[in-house]
Amino acid sequence: MSRSVRPDRRDSLLALSALSAASMLSLSAYAQAQSHGADWPRHPIRLVVPFAPGGTSEIVARAVAVELSKQLGQSVYVENKPGGAGVTAMTDVAKAVPDGHTVVLGHVGTLAVNPWMLKSQPYDVNRDFSPVTLLAKVPNLFVIHPDLPAKNFREFVDYAKRHPGKLNYGSAGNASAGHLAMEYLKLVAGIRLEHIPYRGTGPQLVDLLAGRIDVASAGMPALAQHIRSAKLRAIAVGTLDRIPALPDVPTVAEMGYAGFETSQWYGLLVPAGTPQAIIHRLQQESAKALRAASVVERFAADNAIAGGGPPSEFAAFIRAEQATWSDIVRRANIRAD
């Protein structure tokens, strides 16, 4: 025996069926758009830099942001957000909507050192962020104020050993690349220097140029003009090989500290949960930006080595750096000042 359905109930079922079908089509269309990153970017992209203006991090970020803006048809603007050894900026981005419109410039301090140096962080760098691509590796330079009674690296080390604790060095902040490089050097050379953290490379350079601090380590982009004008004296580079821009400046390794190597590096990350299609497109567009003439020229002038590889490659690089710096943090007893 067949069972009849009341007209009003039949109409309701038909309406519900149509609504379900429409919803499924809508979800399917959304998923397809997400899978291809078709709707990205929909508005300007915020690129957060964890340090104050004037340092290597900002120089790298702005060079790439200019090209990305041209390629994507949306403004990619740099927002400097210093504080807390980079924790302030990373916290901001970790809480952002994971839609590809908020990006952070990660570096050795925030990604490879803070997890071991800081007692706690309001995020997990490996869980709450997705790597996009490595942008650049920049050689660390070691520089001194010209009034310091040392003409080269060996004289500097000798002077520091004869005057333990008398010299001070500045950095762009706790866990900045300069802080780490100097602590690494202190460890291998057996010298004692007092650390003065600043809120960025720019403020640090003001005091270094004025002679209020004695020593620093930073990237070529921030230091080049001051070395050329003899306002600062370059005494060593942190790479294994000498750099073309300063062929007469020795490496730390060749000064008797075999294997010593330290460089600044910068890469893009987005909040965890950002669609893979958007991550893939951002990586591809970043790689294209790194090949732009303006970026190639700027990086060459600063002896920077461009990246641009896939997210998996950047993730593996971060893991390797974490292994290296966790050991150095422990041995040098690096703590947040």
Image (cartoon, rainbow, N blue to C red):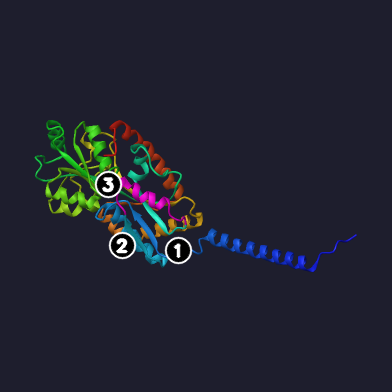
Q: Say which of marks 3 and 1 sits in front.
A: 1
Which is nearer the N-term, disc 3 or disc 1?
Answer: 1
Image label count: 3
Q: Is residue 67 above or below residue 219?
A: below
Q: Is residue 185 above or below residue 106?
A: above
Helix, strand or loop at label 3? It is strand
Q: The C terminus is located in which quarter?
A: top left
Q: Residue 88: say if magenta.
A: yes
* Residue depicted at x 9% and y 40%: 149
Residue 104: % across, % down: 38, 53
Residue 124: % across, % down: 42, 43
Specify whether 253 is left or right of 228.
right
Residue 127: % across, % down: 46, 44
Which is nearer the N-term, disc 1 or disc 2?
Answer: 1
Between 91 and 292, the one nearer to me in the picture: 91
Residue behind mark 1:
41
Q: Taking the image as drawn, is residue 253 in sight?
A: no
Q: Residue 77: say if magenta.
A: no
Between 7 and 99, the one nearer to me in the picture: 7
Which is nearer the N-term, disc 3 or disc 2?
Answer: 3
Helix, strand or loop at label 1? It is loop
Q: Is residue 118 above or below residue 312?
A: above
The amino acid type found where label 3 is placed reads: Pro
Residue behind mark 2:
294
> Which residues, given as a range, are shown in magenta?
81-98
The amino acid type found where label 1 is placed reads: Pro
Q: Which mark is residue 139?
A: 3
